[in-house]
Image (cartoon, rainbow, N blue to C red):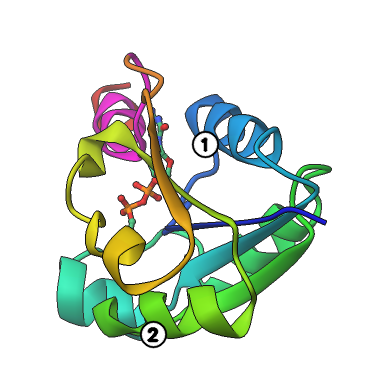
Amino acid sequence: MKRVITYGTFDLLHYGHINLLRRAKEQGDYLIVALSTDEFNWREKQKKCYFDYEKRKQLLEAIRYVDLVIPEEGWGQKVTDVKEYHIDTFVMGDDWVGEFDFIEEQTPATVLYLPRTPEVSTTQIKSDLKLN
Ligand code: C2G
């Protein structure tokens, strides 16, 4: 069984996220999503989510491509996660290109950056909604 992991906030879930999750699942048989906790988002990304962690987790668990959702509580957990869950492929959108190459040096996993869906983002959705 080929195991894949990806990380993110996934607030205001949209088709860009779904495109990423679909392609991540195509890399294997089992997809784990490490979902940023509210505390991590605020402390490390200065992001205040519209939906809290439990709601964002509930939405992700309803997606056919997603097999398991675990909390992302800090930047430093990725190597441990990859080893603990016996991950074969670590996937992120290419806005992160290069940022996680160390995973290949420190674990047996392959790192794959996938093209983002260009025209949609949670930030854009929030800004558009303010205008209407
Ligand atoms: N994404 C995408 N296309 C978009 C928007 C997002 O492919 N239009 C991808 C991102 O590249 C990322 C994933 O969807 O791989 C989740 O996006 P975010 O929720 O914005 O995640 P981010 O805040 O970048 O957190 O430790 C890593 C961080 O937790 C990633």
Is the residue indicated by label 2 positioned so its CB lies within 8 Å of ligand 1? no
Query: Where's the N terminus, which quadrant?
Result: bottom right
Instruction: Specify the quadrant of the image occupied by residue 47.
Output: bottom left
Q: Residue at left 37%, top 83%?
A: 77
The structure residue drawn at horizontal position 66% and vertical position 69%, both measured from the top left corner, is 69
Q: Mark 1 points at which residue?
A: 17
Q: In this view, does 13 lie to the left or right of 92?
A: right
How crowded pointer 1 is (Cα within 10 Å; few <14, some 14-19, many 20+) is rated as many
Q: How crowded is mark 2: few (under 14 residues within 10 Å), some or many (20 or more)?
A: some
Indicate yes or no whether the magenta region holds residue 82.
Answer: no
The type of residue carrying mark 2 is: Glu
The answer to whether the residue bearing label 1 lies less than 8 angstroms from the nearest atom of ligand 1 is yes
43 or 85, nearer to the observer: 85
Residue furthest to the top: 119
Q: Where is residue 71 in the image (x, y as percent from the top left)?
A: 53, 80
The residue at 23%/36% (across/down) is 95
Q: Is residue 28 above or below residue 51?
A: above
In the image: residue 114, left or right of residue 65: left
Q: Position of residue 56 (x, y in %)?
A: 59, 62
Query: Which one is earlier in the sequence, the residue at label 2 or at label 1?
Result: 1
Above-or-below relation of 37 to 57: below
- Residue 73 - label: 2
* Residue nearer the viewer, 124 or 33: 33
Q: What stretch is highlighted in magenta?
A: 119-128
Determine the residue positioned at 53% across, 80% down. Answer: 83
Q: In which quarter of the image is the C terminus?
A: top left
Q: What element carries label 2?
A: loop
Residue 9 quadrant: bottom left
Q: How far apart are marks 2 and 1 (CA)?
A: 20 Å
Residue 100 visible from this viewpoint: yes
Check disc 1 and report its element: helix, strand or loop: helix
